[in-house]
Amino acid sequence: MRNRAIAALVGLAALAVGVSACGQAEYEVPSISLGELKACGNLPIPDGYRCGSLRVPFERSDGDVGKTTVGFAVRPRDEMDGPSQGAIFAAEGGPGYSSTGTATAYEHVFGDLLDTRELVLVDQRGTGRSEPIDCRDLQQGKGPELITLPECARRLGERTGSYRTEAIADDVDDVREALGYDEITLYGDSYGTFLAQSYAYQHRDHLDALVLDSAYPLAGESGWYPSIPRTGIRLMSLACERTPGCEGDAGKRLQRLVDHLRDTGRDVGALINAIAGAGSGPKAVHYFQDVDQAGQALLNGDPKPWRKLTDEGKPAYHHPRFYARPAEMAISCNDYSLLWDTDASEEERREQLEQAIRDQDPKAFEPFTPREIALSSELAYLYCITWPQPADSYERPKPDDANPPKVPTLVVAGEFDNITTPREGRLVADEFPNSTYYEVPDAGHVSSLYDGHSHEAREIRRFIRENTHEG
């Protein structure tokens, strides 16, 4: 990457002071110019970015909980001789992945929009440059998560509920204010769409456009997340139909494989997880075919491809600067729909989980049973059963009784994405009154990040160009 000229982003903004009242934290959002930021210095951020940070309260309603650091990186626009056309803020997914760690991919997606716009990447609290949660046993996979997660919660203490989407949206807005932008264009991918929707509900007056790339509803689904397994099961057959040389009925092969796994005492959950992860990336059709072919080989007496597909081995999570496993688990347990009431005790949660399995339609996920979906796969967030009950300060990602903002919104979905499914994308588009839904044939999860020349990346650029300042 070539070095870019450094100049002031905008004029200094006036100091904004947090409301001071009984029980509320008092703090200031400082004004920051680009010239005051420092060279980022560390990979994976490309050359030319400038990095900074803010100190924000863990709880804006309670200053006694303390403060945390929110780190961010700014890519100056390429054409510094002319005026800025505004800023694109991009939010990564997971949760747990750092937005700064995806800088290069975001540059490819936004392309020539960055000639006249700044790109701002804010790492969510607990990730990347925003004080990754220090729970090393959990991060390094040194023990069962049913043990390492509650130990991490014990160490976090009263901060356990502070790692939540609503608070992160406020952090993003503080960075916006500090940099002096009245309005921003907000892009989110995967969990970043969840965060971006929360931001849109809370800070709608500061948005000029919203892009939700591989989205799922802010209001949440059932704790079963039924569209994930159902879509994956359907796509096993569709992938075979789309692949030259794939013969026979992939759906019937899947049923035979499930029966074989049960008869031989193998883990059916490994198959569920393999299907659930097949929608990742740009080659989702091929990934579904990999599952089908490994299953065929196992049925034909060759277990090696199956072992390679399903043997995860020892967890090897990335360095916390790239991916913070504790942050993913904390945010998920705080904000996602679960099969039990989060206000319940652990004993009551286990009872509610069992009851949910008994109450579910036994044919809901054929060829799998509800018990296999809930207990032998990663789909039910079982580790959250040990997470603490929410504190009184907890705020949901979507304010109660809030009307959806009318900001121009683009929802992008991949046809072969069973992580954030097209059905979920359509639900999100239906939620926002000024939305456009764009489904990408044959594409998987956040496929735009893998190819800046793809149809979906070009559609994102077109939408931003036509719905923001430059349009």
Image (spheres, rainbow, N blue to C red):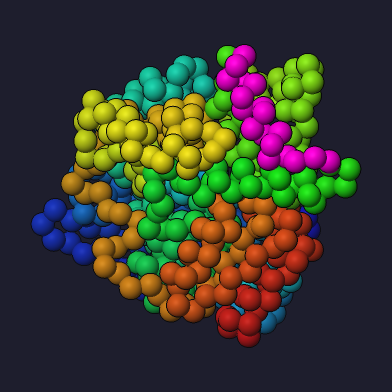
- Judge left or right: residue 205 versus residue 363: left
So how many labels did they put on this image?
0
Q: Residue at x 73, y 39 (%)?
A: 250
Q: Residue at x 79, y 63 (%)?
A: 453
- Judge left or right: residue 380 versus residue 400: right
- Judge left or right: residue 162 versus residue 99: left
Query: In the rendered image, is residue 130 in sight?
Result: no
Query: In the rendered image, is residue 297 in sight?
Result: yes
Residue 443 location in percent, x, y? Answer: 71, 55
Residue 151 location in percent, x, y? Answer: 34, 23
Quadrant (top left/top right/bottom left/bottom right) for the C terminus: bottom right
Q: Is residue 191 above or below residue 170?
A: above
Segment colored magenta: 247-264
Residue 255 location in percent, x, y? Answer: 64, 32
In front of the other: 318 or 72: 318
User: Farthest residue toward the left?
Assistant: 22
Quadrant (top left/top right/bottom left/bottom right) for the N terminus: bottom right
In front of the other: 119 or 220: 220
- Judge left or right: residue 359 versus residue 253: left
The magenta stretch spans residue 220? no
The magenta stretch spans residue 248? yes
Quadrant of the rendered image containing residue 169? bottom left
User: Farthest residue toward the bottom?
Assistant: 471
Q: Residue at x 43, y 23 (%)?
A: 145
Magenta residues, dominant SS class: helix
Q: Residue at x 27, y 40 (%)?
A: 342
User: Farthest residue toward the right?
Assistant: 245
